[in-house]
DNA sequence: ATATTTGCAAAGAGTTTGCATCATA
DNA sequence: TATGATGCAAACTCTTTGCAAATAT
């Protein structure tokens, strides 16, 4: 699926979400949606805010925060808390659920975030659902690693 | 193993850690270690700070933060970022590595944190280590669930 | 027309830091 | 006694909020 089709679909998803809630379909929301879906990888709010500025999108920080929460609730982004401090976001639609291998440097700061999939996680989840009598909505698996200096 | 033995051992672990680094063996550090190891479950700094105050331990917030980082580096506590905001800690020594089932209420706030173990996670980790040529130091697996209202 | 959303700046929450004081080695 | 640790408050970072202005419905 091409990027234009992706954008078309996510715009429709957002439209339906907003209409169902009688929210206003503002330019900012559609604009940010495009920027999110053209952004490759994970980002924190500050990084994204600067990226917007650099690309001629003049929205306020408050709008970035608000809008990302709207997207989150609409299932259009995922939100992560890899370590302390800032939340990280990534586009979610057409982006298969995956887990994260977080490469830390010697100071324990994030160096790189790699994605992987492993079906075993799903069996862990279904085991737990049965055993604990809950409905598991979501999961986060973060593996923290250091590069082998071999 | 009884609680007195646990406390004895973790005090020794802390002592060795501090001696190896020529750190001062302060009353505060040993006191907080006891409070951590007598605390049942997960806690955030503010909760722990209040718990200390209520139990006649008058240390500053700064010391709580500093000391928990010392314990973290010494492997005596684990630190988690379940959701936004505050970090959560728990005692780590003699406390088998486990994963977390986070029960959310309808507002998406933490209602309860349950622990579980599942060996499959270890095989995911060893797969990844081989495949990505990294050394995985740690992992966090959080399952977010809602209670079945049946 | 009117009520939601935006933008800005100020407030909040959690954490870290600077500095004087204290106490371990 | 000399340096690391503590305690306090101020600073800092990330996020949320209040309010006036803008704008979608």
Image (tube, coloured by chain):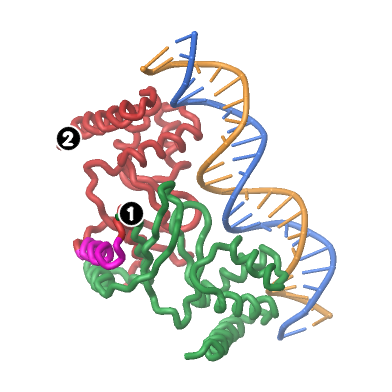
Chain colours: A green, B red, C orange, D blue
Which subunit holds the residue at mark 2? B
Query: Can you name the residue that lies furthest to the left here?
Result: B1
Q: Is residue B86 above or below residue B141?
A: above
Region in magenta: B120-133
Where does residue D20 sit, x and y in percent of width and height? 84, 62
Res. A149 mark: 1
User: How many numbered discs sit on the rendered protein?
Assistant: 2
Q: Is residue A52 magenta?
A: no
Which subunit holds the residue at mark 1? A
- Residue sitting nearer the eye, C10 or B21: B21
Query: Can you name the residue that lies furthest to the front here?
Result: A150
Where does residue B58 sit, x and y in percent of width and height? 46, 26
Residue bearing the label numbered 2: B2
The answer to whether A114 appears left or right of A2 in the picture is left
The answer to whether A5 appears left or right of A97 in the picture is right
Where does residue C20 sit, x and y in percent of width and height? 61, 19
Residue at 19 percent across and 61 percent down: it is B119
The answer to whether B130 appears left or right of A24 in the picture is left
Magenta segment's dominant SS is: helix
Q: Is residue B127 magenta?
A: yes
Q: Nearer the viewer, mark 1 or mark 2?
A: 1
Where does residue B142 sit, x and y in percent of width and height? 35, 61
Residue B91, quarter of the rendered image: top left
Residue at 51 percent across and 77 percent down: it is A76
């Amino acid at each position: 699926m091409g990027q234009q089709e992706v954008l078309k679909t996510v715009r429709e998803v957002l439209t339906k979400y907003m209409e169902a809630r009688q929210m206003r379909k503002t330019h900012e929301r559609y604009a940010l949606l495009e920027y999110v879906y053209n952004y490759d990888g994970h980002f924190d709010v500050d990084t994204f805010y600067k990226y917007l500025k650099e690309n001629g999108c003049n929205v306020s920080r408050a709008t970035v925060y608000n809008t990302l929460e709207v997207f989150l609730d609409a299932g259009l982004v995922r939100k992560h808390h890899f370590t302390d401090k800032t939340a990280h976001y990534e586009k979610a639609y057409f982006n298969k659920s995956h887990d994260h291998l977080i490469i830390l440097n010697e100071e324990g700061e994030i160096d790189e975030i790699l994605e992987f999939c492993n079906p075993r996680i799903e069996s862990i989840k279904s085991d737990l659902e049965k055993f604990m009598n809950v409905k598991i909505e979501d999961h986060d698996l973060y593996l923290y690693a250091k590069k082998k200096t071999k």
